[in-house]
Every structure is written in structure tokens, then in C-alpha cells.
Amino acid sequence: MIVESYRAARPDGSYPHIVIDSINLQRLIDLVTGSRLDELVTYLSESLGRLAAAGADVALLASNTPHLVFDDLRRRSPMPLLSIVEAACVATRAMRLTRVALLGTRFTMEARFYPDVFAASGIGLVIPDADERAYIHERYMDELIHGRFLPATRDGMTAIVDRLVERDAVQAVVLGGTELPLLFRDGPPSRVPLLDTMRIHAERAVATLLAD
């Protein structure tokens, strides 16, 4: 998506210079599940150090859940960090939305990093109820992160979106998990907009690169 957005803005055939440090997802999950957030900050800070040493000028966490420790990482980062949450909030505000729902892992849905950022912009953030959160998290961890995108799961998630619209009067749904857009890509149109935080984040990164 970064390459696609960059080339759309620079039709001269240019490509962005991208440095990737692909981390151990299972270690990240274990640290989050065990509430070992200080260790998570250290682990991700080491990754940022490697990126900086490789010449990166700006960085992003290409996932939502690690934003649990984003503020601590930003303070320790050797370069500017782009927040997927802040980018999603800007996009939501640009659409003049005031009440949206959030889907993601349980860690993302139950943490404060999305509600706090959105509330500061006057946007109400609704999360699914406990049973719905359990369903979403289970499917996320057992299927989505392993690249399994099943029609039955898409139908289940769509039913949750429909209930959020009817029960909570949300105007849109923030897909606060980078696998979620892949689940919904082949389904029928949603009753409300589905905000793809992965694409929003990538486009924010490109805008930052082109602004320098």
C-alpha cells in the first residue's frame, strides 16, 4: 500500500525507500497477553534502533495492538513515529463522523489508546459487547493472523457490525486490526463505511515522505 500510494502521487516511476524490521509476532503476543508491557517497550525500541541504524528517517508500527505502548515508544524513539490511531482519527474527523465503532483484537478494543485519541477530537468510540469481543478476538487469533479468511467468519463479523449500527447508532466502523480489511474485501458492501486503518496509515506515511 505504501508503494501504491507513493507511485500514485509520484507518477514518474519513483519508489519509496522502505526499511522493514519484521519482528516475532508470537513474542509480541506473549508480552501483551502477559501484561509485560515494559518488556514490550524494550523489544520494540530495539527494533526502532535497528531501523534508525539502517537509515530510516521516520517509522511506523504496521499493526494496531502494539500501540498499547505507543506513547512510551514515541518518547524513546530515535526518529519520529507515525501513529495509526492518530491517522485514523484524522481520517474519521475529515468524514465529519461523531460516533464510530471499533473492531480489533481484545487488547485493542479494551484498551484506552483509541478512545482517548478519538475523544480528544470529539468523536465517540463504541466497542462491541463482551460476547461480541470474545468472538472477534477468538477469530482474530485463531484465523486471521494465520491468513485464514473464512466466509462464515466474515458473516459473523458483518452481523456484529449490523448490531452496532442498530443498537449503538454508529456511523462507521474503524477496522482496528490490519487483517480485518482482508476479511471484508470479498463481502457485500457494509451498511456503514469501514475505515481501513492499514490503508490510512500507509497513506499518512506517504504524505509524510512527500512533505520532506
Image (cartoon, helix red, strand yellow):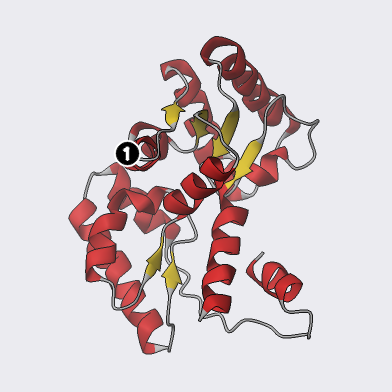
Q: Is residue 201 visible?
A: yes
In this view, 30 is above or below 121:
below
In the rendered image, residue 89, in percent from the top left (x then y), is placed at 47, 45
Q: Residue furthest left?
A: 38
Q: How many C-alpha atoms fall within 10 Å of the one at disc 1: few (<14), some, or many (≥20)?
A: some
| Quadrant (top left/top right/bottom left/bottom right) for the N terminus | bottom right
In the rendered image, residue 152, in percent from the top left (x then y), is placed at 71, 26
Residue visible at 31% across and 56% down?
Answer: 70
Residue 193, located in which quarter of the rendered image?
A: top right
In this view, 96 is above or below 157:
below
Q: Which residue is identified by label 1? A: 116
Q: Is residue 149 visible?
A: no
Left or right of residue 135, residue 151 in this image: right
Residue visible at 75% across and 31% down?
Answer: 151
Residue 25, located in which quarter of the rendered image?
A: bottom left
Residue visible at 21% across and 59% down?
Answer: 39
Observer-nearest residue: 114 or 44? 114
In this view, 200 is above or below 98:
below
Left or right of residue 4, residue 169 in this image: left
Q: Amino acid at mark 1?
A: Asp
Looking at the rendered structure, the secondary structure element under dot 1 is helix
Residue visible at 63% across and 26% down?
Answer: 157
